[in-house]
Amino acid sequence: NAGVMQNPRHLVRRRGQEARLRCSPMKGHSHVYWYRQLPEEGLKFMVYLQKENIIDESGMPKERFSAEFPKEGPSILRIQQVVRGDSAAYFCASSPLGQGNTEAFFGQGTRLTVV
Amino acid sequence: DQQVKQNSPSLSVQEGRISILNCDYTNSMFDYFLWYKKYPAEGPTFLISISSIKDKNEDGRFTVFLNKSAKHLSLHIVPSQPGDSAVYFCAAREIQGAQKLVFGQGTRLTINP
């Protein structure tokens, strides 16, 4: 039973390029959460999605960031026109129910470096 | 606005002794608290949780205590082992079915042989 899979593990982008981060939840999990961790800080909630629906995006920056979780395929976090401040570790988590009822399982993260 | 605070960035403990990690929160709407452990270059791993209706939860070497009046929780690890060396994050969830966790900044625990 594979865990939460994130790819790529490391991503380097030049300023102004687009970054696409992928997350495949654990089998049977229909809830996905994205968190961002800046250096020396804790994880900050970005967005909560169910299949084909964005449930809570209160932690997402208003511009350049978007997320989706299509009916088929992984969840995607997309960052357009990346800037140096986007450099961080991005973690995806999944749960079978809403996270309020059970702990979420995290992937290993994607480390984005903007040069 | 840091609603969950871990004021000790690091903690060093002798192997076999007790490790106590602390966490304070400000939001009285939090009703569920979790501790995660994180190794470098890996994602957080769930350790133990506690509901606000309890004041203690124990799982093997790990015990979490909750003091609601003080808005404080702590994680006790006893006896501490070298494999416990990691960054520990405290996290909290709001009531009413909110789905996001609010994390503290983390405490780096080092267990010395």
Image: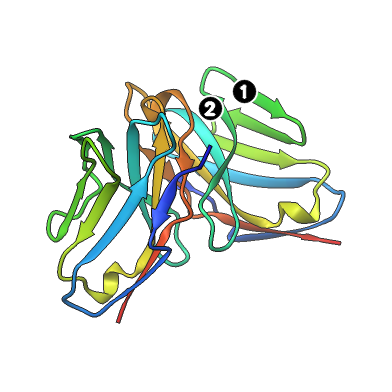
Q: Secondary structure at mark 2?
A: loop
Q: Is residue B96 left or right of residue A68?
A: right
Pointer 2 chain: B
Q: Nearer the viewer, residue A108 or B73?
A: A108
Q: Are marks 2 and 1 on the same chain?
A: yes
Q: Residue furthest top?
A: B53
Q: Nearer the viewer, residue B38 or B49?
A: B38
Image quadrant where residue B18 sits: top right
Q: Quadrant of the C terminus of chain B?
A: bottom right
Q: Is residue A25 visible?
A: yes
Pointer 1 chain: B
- Total tally of numbered discs in the picture: 2
Q: Position of residue A38 (x, y in %)?
A: 39, 63
- Residue identified by numbered label 1: B55
Q: Nearer the viewer, residue B81 or A3?
A: A3
Residue B68 image label? 2
Q: Position of residue B48 (x, y in %)?
A: 61, 34
Q: Is residue B98 left or right of residue A70?
A: right
Q: Position of residue B11 (x, y in %)?
A: 69, 58
Which residue lies at the image location 54% right of the left edge and 54% below the top edge? B106
Residue type at mark 2 is Lys
Which residue lies at the image location 24% right of the left edge and 80% below the top edge? A14
